[in-house]
Image (cartoon, rainbow, N blue to C red):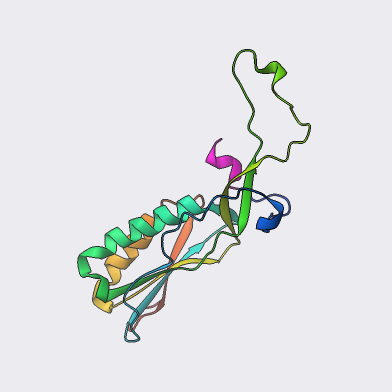
Amino acid sequence: MKGSNYRRPNGMPLTHRDYAGGVPNLRIARFSTGSARSDYEVTLEMRSTEMAQIRDQAIEAARVAANKKMNPIGEENYRLTVKQYPHVIISENKMIATAGADRLQEGMRRAYGKPIGRAARVRPETVIMVIETMQKDLSLAKKALATAGSKMPMPIRVNVVNAPNSGT
């Protein structure tokens, strides 16, 4: 199944694991990396620009990409936090498309489907990921979030929230 089939949220989300048996485990390894200090000078946010549904694999790929870009300055000089948790359970009605499959398919009868993954639904201006770092590493952090944004299913925007001598 294509990822584009799950990009746009439609209908009510299924979020209760009790009602969907066999929900896969979360694929995000950790939600926070780096050092938790209080003296960071700059905070950057990756925000969505449109409504979308982000699969947990995309969130993990974005986290890994941003962490890899920030690694050269050392883990004690930044903090990367994923702000979205994938609550929505995605299900798929798998259809058999091989020869002789006409007697095995049910078509749209009982077409609920099996759970195949999880996703987070975001609206415009929702914060997805945050990097806190020092002023000297601002450009590297912007590149890290831009790289992470390329893993997202919608366009993103990077905001510098609090930076001394910065216009944003």
- Residues 9 and 156: in front is 9
- Residues 30 and 68: in front is 30
**Residue at point 28%, 78% (across, down):** 134
* Residue furthest out toward the bottom: 39
Residue 22 visible here: yes
- Above or below: residue 129 compared with residue 152: below
Tell me residue 2's x, y (percent).
54, 37
Quadrant for residue 136, please give it: bottom left
Tell me residue 133's x, y (percent).
31, 76
- Residues 72 and 154: in front is 72
Tag count = 0
- Residues 118 and 141: in front is 118
Q: Is residue 166 left or right of residue 137?
A: right
- Above or below: residue 166 compared with residue 74: below
Magenta stretch: includes residue 105: no
- Above or below: residue 100 compared with residue 127: above
Tell me residue 151's x, y (percent).
42, 51
**Residue at point 77%, 36% (across, down):** 110
Q: Which residues are magenta?
A: 1-7
Tell me residue 100's x, y (percent).
64, 13
**Residue at point 56%, 41% (across, down):** 4
Residue 149 visible here: no
Magenta stretch: includes residue 2: yes
Quadrant in which the N terminus appears: top right
* Residue furthest out toward the top: 100
Quadrant in which the C terminus appears: bottom left
